[in-house]
Amino acid sequence: MTKNDKRQTKVKLAVYGKGGIGKSTTSCNISVALAKRGKKVLQIGCDPKHDSTFTLTGFLIPTIIDTLQEKDYHYEDVWPEDVIYKGYGGVDCVEAGGPPAGAGCGGYVVGETVKLLKELNAFDEYDVILFDVLGDVVCGGFAAPLNYADYCLIVTDNGFDALFAANRIAASVREKARTHPLRLAGLIGNRTSKRDLIEKYVEAVPMPVLEVLPLIEDIRVSRVKGKTLFEMAEYDPSLNYVCDYYLNIADQILARPEGVVPNDAPDRELFSLLSDF
Ligand code: ADP
Ligand code: MG
């Protein structure tokens, strides 16, 4: 493989979705799935909750904001090993962190994180960089990862609130796609065995559905254990079927899907589409 080929295999992903929908869980397992396929992966938690990489490392790693505070915001004193931690499967992990609760701007922190990692030349080392971002507030700062991403992935369940959030994220992707080579790879259904509302939504706003994961008790437990499903499956091979969902998503991403530039639905249309009245 030549150097140029290697550069072409690079892919940057931004995972969005309503709070608590399963973005971090899904992100960590996709990251491991990509690592299993031989890729060098960096996962960047961009949620002020700073628990994105918890199931990869088994603990809450120090955030970029903590580290910068410790170094009096002297960026030049920050080394990659201060902020990049090794997680399961060889996945590297970063947490942006957040400002003190009720003060400052979380989106600003995301911007600073990207800036710092670029200064550390950390961006060039990886085949895949995955940003795990919250999706309720798509302000300029939280939308920043879309400036760097090739693909946006949206995690949703089969309910109104998550699909409503998904539609707002789709609108952000459409806006960013005007000036960036960004595509929406599609939706990942999570924690649902039903998909009727998801189907209704993608009929109105066409986009691929990459996978739909049901509610699986072992996924809930993985959060408590601080392990990905891949690590749990090492001891319990009956969980391999869960890993297959994530491997399937990883393989679709590595196949460089065409994706879409979505046309989000107007809010009022979405209300009537997804409601019974
Ligand atoms: P987010 O990052 O979107 O805020 P998390 O990934 O932290 O959400 O997930 C919230 C909770 O839901 C966690 O306890 C996680 O274990 C659980 N969870 C996520 N996906 C599933 C699933 N498919 N089945 C069961 N529990 C899940
Ligand atoms: Mg999260």
Image (spheres, grey):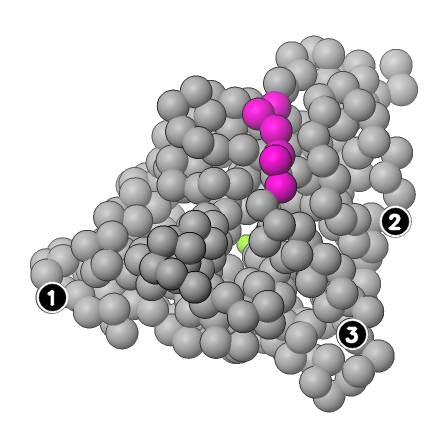
Stretch in magenta: 257-262
N-terminal of the pair, mark 3 or mark 1, is: 1
Q: Which is more toward the observer, 79 or 246?
A: 246
* Quadrant location of the N terminus in the rendered image: bottom left
User: Which residue is identified by label 3?
Assistant: 240
Distance Cα–Cα, label 3 vs label 1: 43 Å
* Quadrant location of the C terminus in the rendered image: top right
Q: Is residue 63 left or right of residue 167?
A: left
Q: Which is more toward the observer, 66 or 145?
A: 145
User: Which residue is identified by label 1?
Assistant: 77
Figure quadrant of residue 147: top left
**Tag nearer the camera, 2 or 3:** 3
Residue 96 drawn at (x, y percent): 36, 55
Q: Residue at x 79, y 75 (%)?
A: 239
Any part of residue 156 in sight? no
Q: Which labelled disc corresponds to residue 193?
A: 2
The outermost residue toward the bottom is: 235
Q: Secondary structure at mark 1?
A: helix
Distance Cα–Cα, label 2 vs label 3: 19 Å
Type of amino acid under label 3: Asn
Tell me the crowding category of disc 3: few under 14, some 14 to 19, or many 20 or more residues within 10 angstroms, Cα based.
Answer: some
Looking at the magenta stretch, what is its main secondary structure?
loop
Q: Is residue 256 above or below residue 173?
A: below
N-terminal of the pair, mark 2 or mark 3, is: 2
